[in-house]
Image (cartoon, grey):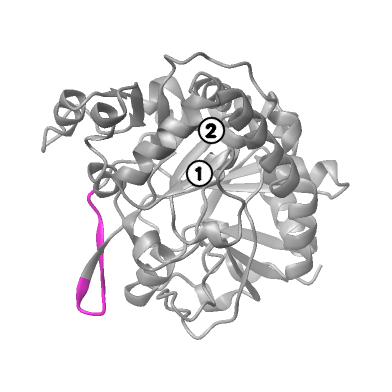
């Protein structure tokens, strides 16, 4: 939502095309689609959007085999035909639908993961005209991300600041938190396995709540099955585990959860630290914009972003504990600095100008 809201505020005509593969249950599909438009309505962008519903068995995306919601199929075709630019997030739009757009830009927000996946799966990446990534170090000599023979340009993620206002101090008992997926996934790279799992990322810091002697909380979709007993293990080490679908299941709940946190404790997927991608999370930017300091494991972002006040980086549990103590020791100062970083570096206005310039627009 940061993108259409920011683009519209800058005077651009924007149309959001959302794709949904059928669950096989008509009632469930329609419920999801209604919920999607209802949420966009609260932000005034539901009339500039369409959902294309595809059969669950289709591996490709032929537009003539889709059902359109929010706009007629003919209107969607006209918009695609006349569009100056497609911003395609993480290869969401694939062939043959992709070929209908005149100027196609790939936005990679998961550097390393996307490129390694492309080595074994055809994601239609070369069918784009411009390749943009938030992996700020992708062209650095020591960055291991395979570039797939393509010219990658970089951009910073951003927030639409009118959506995010600094919130009052939630108090010293509020937790350091984050909202995250919980997977076991690994990818092969150069005869070794490399983790793309937030589970692996946070397990390295299992002892931190006991070390720091303060509340920590993860909104992590561990789920009721939990085959390794992760929820129990984390709780035994002082963490609180909550269901992200309950505490951050809508845009407004997401914002409320961040505002109720003392700061973010962010552990990136190990692929980002091992490959030195320079990745920085748009979720972390939302914390900063809310006046919530961010304590983040360094992926190389400290080379370009100001750290030490409002945004702190760490490389091991000792540095993480020191960062927690630093934030709690002068919270008002770190809170103000967090908001200043969001305003000065991650405002969508200059961010989108730079992105469109990189697209040749």
Does any portion of residue 174 appear in the rendered image? yes
Residue drawn at point x = 81 percent, y = 43 percent? 8
Judge left or right: residue 340 versus residue 316: right
Residue 105 placed where, x, y %?
Answer: 65, 67
The C terminus, quarter of image? bottom right
**Residue range of the region highlighted in magenta in the rendering:** 184-192
Residue drawn at point x = 24 percent, y = 46 percent? 204
Q: Which residue is mark 2?
A: 33
Please name whichever residue, 346 or 57, is drawn nearer the observer in this view of the structure.
346
Residue 116 placed where, x, y %?
Answer: 36, 71
Kind of element beneath mark 2? helix
Label 1 neighbourhood size at 10 Å, few (<14), some (14-19), many (20+)? Answer: many
Please name whichever residue, 361 or 30, is drawn nearer the observer in this view of the structure.
361
Q: Is residue 191 magenta?
A: yes
Q: Which residue is mark 1?
A: 312
- Find residue 87 and name its label: none
Looking at this view, name the residue that lies furthest to the bottom: 149
Rendered image quadrant of residue 221: top left
Residue drawn at point x = 16 percent, y = 33 percent? 226
Please name whichever residue, 284 or 329, is drawn nearer the observer in this view of the structure.
329
- Mark 1 and mark 2 lie on one chain; the one further toward the N terminus is 2
Labels 1, 2: front one: 1
């Amino acid at each position: 939502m940061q993108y259409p809201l920011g683009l519209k505020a800058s005077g651009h005509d924007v149309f959001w095309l959302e794709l949904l593969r059928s669950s096989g249950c008509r009632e469930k599909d329609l419920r999801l689609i209604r919920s999607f438009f209802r949420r966009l309505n609260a932000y005034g962008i539901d009339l500039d959007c369409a959902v294309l519903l595809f059969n669950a068995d289709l591996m490709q995306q032929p537009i003539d085999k889709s059902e359109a919601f929010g706009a007629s199929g003919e209107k969607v075709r006209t918009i695609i035909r006349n569009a100056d630019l497609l911003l395609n997030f993480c290869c969401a739009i694939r062939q043959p639908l992709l070929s209908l757009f005149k100027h196609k830009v790939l936005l990679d927000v998961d550097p390393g993961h996307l490129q390694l996946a492309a080595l074994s799966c055809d994601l239609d990446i070369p069918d784009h005209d411009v390749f943009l990534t938030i992996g700020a170090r992708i062209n650095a000599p020591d960055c291991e991300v395979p570039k797939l023979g393509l010219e990658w340009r970089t951009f910073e993620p951003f927030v639409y600041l009118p959506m995010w206002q600094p919130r009052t101090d939630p108090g010293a008992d509020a937790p350091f938190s984050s909202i995250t997926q919980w997977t076991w996934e690994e990818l092969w790279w150069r005869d070794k396995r490399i983790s793309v799992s937030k589970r692996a990322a946070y397990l390295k810091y299992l002892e931190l709540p006991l070390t720091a002697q303060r509340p920590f909380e993860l909104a992590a979709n561990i789920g009721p099955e939990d085959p390794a007993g992760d929820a129990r293990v984390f709780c035994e080490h002082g963490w609180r585990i909550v269901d992200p679908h309950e505490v951050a299941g809508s845009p407004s709940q997401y914002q409320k959860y961040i505002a109720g946190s003392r700061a973010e404790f962010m552990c990136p997927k190990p692929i980002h630290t091992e490959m030195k991608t320079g990745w920085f999370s748009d979720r972390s930017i939302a914390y900063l914009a809310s006046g919530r300091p961010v304590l983040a494991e360094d992926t190389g972002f400290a080379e370009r972003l100001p750290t030490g006040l409002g945004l702190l980086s760490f490389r091991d549990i000792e540095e993480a504990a020191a960062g927690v103590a630093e934030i709690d020791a002068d919270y008002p100062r770190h809170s103000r600095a967090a908001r200043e970083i969001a305003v000065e570096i991650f405002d969508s206005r200059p961010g989108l100008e730079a992105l469109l310039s990189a697209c040749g627009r």
